[in-house]
Image (tube, rainbow, N blue to C red):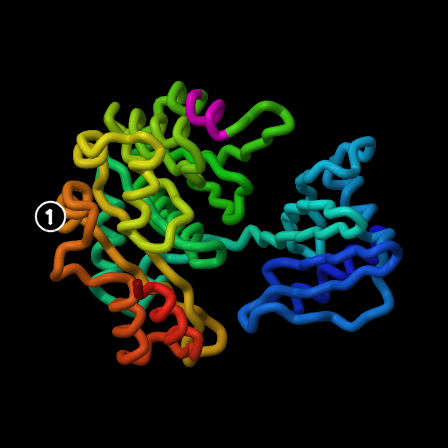
């Protein structure tokens, strides 16, 4: 069964998949790969329900409670590469659906290589010199947030002057230059517990992998107010929606104005070079950020995410026919 699972993961990697989706109906199992082209159905008769049940076992599921939604994790070694896998299952009457997220611990990318937009590079590099404040990155899964954050942290750590610590779930990009802590909810090491512990470890720069609830948001603000430089992510459509989410978490406008350095929303697109991708950034900072916090709207002169995407298309930075559809999605 292990060999069957490894062969499936290997095939998914060859198809450049980020996720493997499963639908199990009685003894039949459908498989789809999610990649840059969307969802790709795999016609096959090799992998069956046995592989699905095996993944539950190695992911540490409670097999005595099969009807409860569960998630877990495991890793596999393919050649010289370790693939970190996060597996989740939801049961609906006679149907089981599962998603296997594939995470390769690739080396960090340099800030200069994230985008061709010189203004974005200049701003991101300026963040490596900040010593107090809060920077939030927003965007959906696979928008490049983790790559951007680790590029910034790597450059800070290279200066060898500050104690850099990250708290992540999972650790997607390994970097020997700073301490990386892995969330393990089964062992009680949650984001909430992890933040409390790392603040006792005398950090200068902190990465909180995701601000997902009101308690985490308050702890992130607390860390920024007590003299730390804090980076974190939110799942939000754009920079303004990120502010709305923080306010929904119960944070005050006063706290946001006194801690936030910038809110950055981003997307990841293919370029004309098929071997690389390009990040497109919306940056909300300084007076524009204060205006958005106070008025709950963008200032008229602000370049929104859809503006930055359109500019990247016109400049030839990105080559993705889906970009135009994304712009429509942002319009209200």
Quarter of the image that includes the C terminus? bottom left
- Position of residue 170 relative to residue 297, above or below, is above
Q: Residues within 10 Å of mark 1 (few under 14, many from 20)?
A: few
The image quarter containing residue 313 is: bottom left
Residue at 77 percent across and 63 percent down: it is 30
As drawn, is 139 to the left or to the right of 19?
A: left
The x and y percentages for residue 23 are 74, 57
> Is 178 left, or right, of 51 in this rendering?
left
Residue 22 position within the rendered picture, expressed as x and y whole percent measured from the top left: 73, 57
Closer to us: 36 or 249: 249
Q: Nearer the viewer, residue 255 or 274?
A: 255
Q: Residue at left 39%, top 19%?
A: 200
Q: Is residue 40 above or below residue 79?
A: below
- SS label for mark 1: helix
x, y percentage for residue 155?
Answer: 33, 48
Name the main secondary structure of what is drawn in magenta: helix
What residue sits 67% from the left and 41% below the top? 73
Tag 1 residue: 287
Rendered location of residue 177, percent (x, y):
43, 41
Q: Quadrant of residue 269?
A: bottom left
Is 33 magenta? The answer is no
Magenta span of residues = 191-196
């Amino acid at each position: 069964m292990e060999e069957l699972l490894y062969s499936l993961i290997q095939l998914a990697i060859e198809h450049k998949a980020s996720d493997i989706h499963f639908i199990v109906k009685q003894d039949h199992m459908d498989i789809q790969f999610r990649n840059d082209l969307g969802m790709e159905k795999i016609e096959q008769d090799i992998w069956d329900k046995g592989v699905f049940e095996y993944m539950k076992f190695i992911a540490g599921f409670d097999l005595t409670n099969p009807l409860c939604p569960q998630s877990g994790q495991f890793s596999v070694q393919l050649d010289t590469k370790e693939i970190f896998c996060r597996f989740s299952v939801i049961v609906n009457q006679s149907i089981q659906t599962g998603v296997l997220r594939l995470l390769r611990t690739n080396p960090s990318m340099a800030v200069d290589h994230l985008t061709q937009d010189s203004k974005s590079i200049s701003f991101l590099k300026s963040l490596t010199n900040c010593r107090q404040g809060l920077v939030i990155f927003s965007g959906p899964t696979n928008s490049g947030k983790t790559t951007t954050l680790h590029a910034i942290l790597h450059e800070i750590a290279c200066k060898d002057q500050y104690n850099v610590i990250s708290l992540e779930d999972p650790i997607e990009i390994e970097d020997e230059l700073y301490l990386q802590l892995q969330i393990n909810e089964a062992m009680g090491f949650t984001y909430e517990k992890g933040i409390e512990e790392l603040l006792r470890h005398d950090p200068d720069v902190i990465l909180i992998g995701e601000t997902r609830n009101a308690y985490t948001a308050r702890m992130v603000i607390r860390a920024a107010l007590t003299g730390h430089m804090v980076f974190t992510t939110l799942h939000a459509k754009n920079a303004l929606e990120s502010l709305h989410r923080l306010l929904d978490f119960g944070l005050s406008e006063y706290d946001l104005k006194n801690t936030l350095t910038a809110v950055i929303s981003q997307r990841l697109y293919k370029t004309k070079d098929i071997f690389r991708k390009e990040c497109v950034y919306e940056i909300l900072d300084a007076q524009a950020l204060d205006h958005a916090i106070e008025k709950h709207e963008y200032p008229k002169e602000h370049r929104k995410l859809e503006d930055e995407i359109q500019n990247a298309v016109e400049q030839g930075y990105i080559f993705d026919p889906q970009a135009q559809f994304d712009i429509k999605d942002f319009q209200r």
